[in-house]
Image: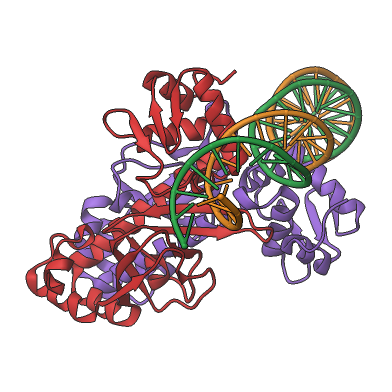
Chain colours: A red, B purple, C orange, D green
Amino acid sequence: MDMTSIIASIPLFKGLSNGQCASLGAIAVRRYFSRGDIFFQEGDDAFGFYVILSGKVKIYKLSPDGKEQIFHILDAHEPFGEAAVFAGLHYPASAQALCETSVLFFPTQRFVDLITREPSLALSMLALLSMRLRKLTTLVENLSLKEIPVRLAAYLLFQCNGDGSLSTSSLEVSKNQMAGLLGTIPETLSRVLKRMADEKLIKTSPRTITILDRKGLADLAEGNRKLT
Amino acid sequence: MDMTSIIASIPLFKGLSNGQCASLGAIAVRRYFSRGDIFFQEGDDAFGFYVILSGKVKIYKLSPDGKEQIFHILDAHEPFGEAAVFAGLHYPASAQALCETSVLFFPTQRFVDLITREPSLALSMLALLSMRLRKLTTLVENLSLKEIPVRLAAYLLFQCNGDGSLSTSSLEVSKNQMAGLLGTIPETLSRVLKRMADEKLIKTSPRTITILDRKGLADLAEGNRKLT
DNA sequence: CGCCGCTTTGAATTACATCAAAGGACGTGG
DNA sequence: CCACGTCCTTTGATGTAATTCAAAGCGGCG
């Protein structure tokens, strides 16, 4: 697949003409990363942003004493590092590959030049940043206003497939990482999962969690019910 | 002062030509709010965004049981509600006037039209959203990774004037609101302030907090020291 | 098979919230 | 100018969710 059609297939760039995709293609650089590789760390100088072609990427911060707060776990087609392009000289968080990952890299300067000439691209980026803002807003809300069983219930409902099952492995998130995403630690997560299983809300097998009582979880997430 | 020069004086719109400011002026609506008035609430349909001309505005969310997390306290010249313009149909948080406040309101549709024609305006908005993202990122970090004395120390250092004093009144933030901003409650804030005073890091008088030991606070904020 | 990382479990600790109540500040109206 | 009510702030006693520390299963992979 050539660069132009790759770019045309990225949702962020949907609606752009062939010519515009070609211009983007001209400035994009393809890169490959392995599980555990670091794209950048909090505070690094920012020279551009990335779009995932395949693989998974974790955006996170570490506290001085090693606890990790994960901001996002991103999949194919999702961009990251984009806020640094317009605001900052450095990245506000760190990014690491969770598995073999291929990305496109867009250098700041050339991308900004392009945006100046392409209003529709600008609008796409505005929409993207706004969505990020929104996600972060609910993360703040969860961290500050909700207790962990509530966060977990909401997370499970959000992540689950139509059949009510979800596998931690298919998500490539270990329960460890799930904990980081919920703003807690593995021990606590494990205990809460057990309590939920005790109440027949879910069933846990090695690397899978199955939702047994969607309504019950929803009640929990809404705060209409509590875990005994 | 006429609309065009008002707009030209807003940092968000700096760099725009007179003509561009005039176009913005043509779509802006001036509005006035009193202390306690609500601009919009979380979930309301979003028809546009605001820029503060004078006064103060609080952006916040409420938990079901009434606890409040403040996201920002905004001053003159700062915009708010802008994320809803590009992403959403509704506002992700609520906004309330903390005192007599006058604003400009920009309706979504007309503003987006304008942006499409003005790349420099688009870049300004991109920078704005990116800054917001950055601020929110550190809020998440604080909420999830840092304990309250650490957050408070960082906040005090950030807010203080050159001379090391800051008054809660001049900020128009009651300690109540300060608590909401730090993701806690007034009682806890009060206790932590007292502990800091006990250790001669600060001095509190009715509506003023004075920093006595900037270095000590910085150590706290860095996690190199702890409150006994 | 044996090792290492992930996950679970238990017991002790802690930071923070909650509940309840008493002091101030401040402005209003008498 | 003082009295009064309201709101903000402080203080103490109590409760609890969640972290910490420690250690033991479990599982996958070389």
Q: Is residue C27 above or below residue B151?
A: above
Foreground residue, A102 or B214? Answer: A102
Q: Quadrant of the N terminus of chain B?
A: bottom left
Q: Which quadrant of the structure image shows residue A5?
A: bottom left
Percent position of residue B96, x then y: 50, 41
Percent position of residue B224, x then y: 78, 64
Q: Which quadrant of the structure image shows residue B175?
A: top right
Percent position of residue B181, x then y: 62, 47
Tell me, yes or no, if residue B59 can be seen here: no
Q: Is residue A25 above or below residue B81?
A: below
Foreground residue, A69 or A201? Answer: A201
Q: Is residue A27 above or below residue C9?
A: below
Foreground residue, D24 or B202? Answer: D24
Foreground residue, B157 or C10? Answer: C10
Percent position of residue B87, x then y: 29, 50
Instruction: Please name the residue shown 51% across and 17% down the image.
Output: A199
Instruction: Please name the residue shown 39% across and 48% down the image.
Output: A134
In the current view of this chain or complex, which residue is farthest to the left? A18
- In the visual, does A50 lie left or right of B212? left
Marks counted in the figure total 0
Tell me, yes or no, if residue A86 can be seen here: yes
Instruction: Please name the residue shown 52% across and 43% down the image.
Output: A182
